[in-house]
């Protein structure tokens, strides 16, 4: 299975070079992660060696223990107010090796491979400032079979990162799991590629999560912003709710209220995007109330079921395209035709869209912006206002617009 850089998250040619450079130079000294420890004290394991008894975390001093053992199990026993203190991510993203095939395989010795049970408690008033790093969030990088973060509340967090930046998790790898996370209050996430409120980039299932956040993609021609997750590949989403704002400059793509994309996911069920404002520059593409793009290329279509979009507005340039109430469409661009000869395929079932407004753009639909016979819509109820005119047109454009005419 190809990974985010080469499959899901194919950048423009300039973006590819920039990302490759960033990945090649993103190594961090473990001392940067926890200034009080030396590199020999960082613990990680491909076997995810978790303690049988979880370590209790009840204070800021206790929280610092996590940096000393990234493979242990932890449980939060009290709310912790960080008072606006700048903290370092728990676990960092660094490629396994310099080989191209390992560019998005985390070094497990530096990533979080344990478990963290929030136990219903809150971590609040946190600042993370690592704009020159990749895999940035409260948990910067999480990997390993059986690793997870769940039952956690986060309130008032400000995160600045590079690629794979999330409010709670920067990069959630295969084998990890995310459940029951709530992001509330005033939350801000800034990054250049794949940014989200709960997670920036994820291969993990994300279940029962809620997020309110303001997201900003900082660089033009970059991909992936969603208030739950910036880029979701292979993993599924279920019972998630998003609200807030997303801002992106010219040429960005895969931007959605809930997720930047459901890419090669089996399903996204029972998810809701409500009270969201998306503002982009011109020449953007694949923008959706729920997801920027969705679909698979080889397996059964991605099922997007029981999705709700309410009070979502999209403001974009007149040359932007493929904009939908549920999804912008399946991933496709002529510049990547060699890899994706046709758009990805999705099944949209029993979804509703209301109070959906779009200003600017073309190929705009209440359900899907563009379908090339690869996206089906069934049991849909929705309407929108596009440039001041009401419409119930489910699909903005189909095969009548040739693939080579798309961005």
Image: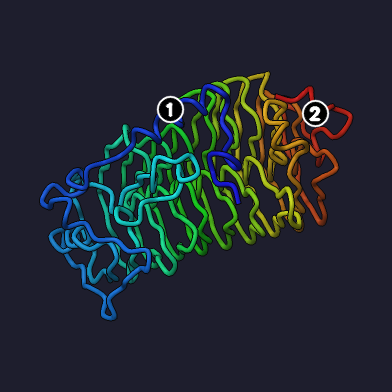
The residue drawn where x is 74% and y is 32% is 364
**Residue 191 vs residue 213, the one in the foreground:** 191
Q: Quadrant of residue 135?
A: top left
Quarter in which the C terminus is drawn: top right
Q: Quadrant of residue 182?
A: bottom left
**Residue 74 vs residue 173, the one in the foreground:** 173
Distance from disc 2 to disc 1, alpha carbons, whole Å, reads 29 Å
The residue drawn where x is 54% and y is 44% is 4
Q: Is residue 210 visible?
A: yes
Q: Up-down: is 71 above or below 355?
A: below
User: Residue 385: horizontal and vertical position, in percent?
Assistant: 72, 33
Q: Up-down: is 320 above or below 395?
A: above
Mark 2 neighbour class, 10 Å CA radius: few under 14, some 14 to 19, many 20 or more: some
The residue singled out by tag 2 in the image is 403
Q: Secondary structure at mark 2?
A: helix
Q: Secondary structure at mark 1?
A: loop
Mark 1 neighbour class, 10 Å CA radius: few under 14, some 14 to 19, many 20 or more: some
**Residue 353 vs residue 130, the one in the foreground:** 130
Image-based side of 219 in relation to 362, left or right: left
Q: Earlier in the sequence, mark 2 or mark 1?
A: 1
The residue singled out by tag 1 in the image is 218
Image-based side of 235 in relation to 47, left or right: right
The residue drawn where x is 22% and y is 68% is 78
Q: Up-down: is 367 above or below 336?
A: below
């Amino acid at each position: 299975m190809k990974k985010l850089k080469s499959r899901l998250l194919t950048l423009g040619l300039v973006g590819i070079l920039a990302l490759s450079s960033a990945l090649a130079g993103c190594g961090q000294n473990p001392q940067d992660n926890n200034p009080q420890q030396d590199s020999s004290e960082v613990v990680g394991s491909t076997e995810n060696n978790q303690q049988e008894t979880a370590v209790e975390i009840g204070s800021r001093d206790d929280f610092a223990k996590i940096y000393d053992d990234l493979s242990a199990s932890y449980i939060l026993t009290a709310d912790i107010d960080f008072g606006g203190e700048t903290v370092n991510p728990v676990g960092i993203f660094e490629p396994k090796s310099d080989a191209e095939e390992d560019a998005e395989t985390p070094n497990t010795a530096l990533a979080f491979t344990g478990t963290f049970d929030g136990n219903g408690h809150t971590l609040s008033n946190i600042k993370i400032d690592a704009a020159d790093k990749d895999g940035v969030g409260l948990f910067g990088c999480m990997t390993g079979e059986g690793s997870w973060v769940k039952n956690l509340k986060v309130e008032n967090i400000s995160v600045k990162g590079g690629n794979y930046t999330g409010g709670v998790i920067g990069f959630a790898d295969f084998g990890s799991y995310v459940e029951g996370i709530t992001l509330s209050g005033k939350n801000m996430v800034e990054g250049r590629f794949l940014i989200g409120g709960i997670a920036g980039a994820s291969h993990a299932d994300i279940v029962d999560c809620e997020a309110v956040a303001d997201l900003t993609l900082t660089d033009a021609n970059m991909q992936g912003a969603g208030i739950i997750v910036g880029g979701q590949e292979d993993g599924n989403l279920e019972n998630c709710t998003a609200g807030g704002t997303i801002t992106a400059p010219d040429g960005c793509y895969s931007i959605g209220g809930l997720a930047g994309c459901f890419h090669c996911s089996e399903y996204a069920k029972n998810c809701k995007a409500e009270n969201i404002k998306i503002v982009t520059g011109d020449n953007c593409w694949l923008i959706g109330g729920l997801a920027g793009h969705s679909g698979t290329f080889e397996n059964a279509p991605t099922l997007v079921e029981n999705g709700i979009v309410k009070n979502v507005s999209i403001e974009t340039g007149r040359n932007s395209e493929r904009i939908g109430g549920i999804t912008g469409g399946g991933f496709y661009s002529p510049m990547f035709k060699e890899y994706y000869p046709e758009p990805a395929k999705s099944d949209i079932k029993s979804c509703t869209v209301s109070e959906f407004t779009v200003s600017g753009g073309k190929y705009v639909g209440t359900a899907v912006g563009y379908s090339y016979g690869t996206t089906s819509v069934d049991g849909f109820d929705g309407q929108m206002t596009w440039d001041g005119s009401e419409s119930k047109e489910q699909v903005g454009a189909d095969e009548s617009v040739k693939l080579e005419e798309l961005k």
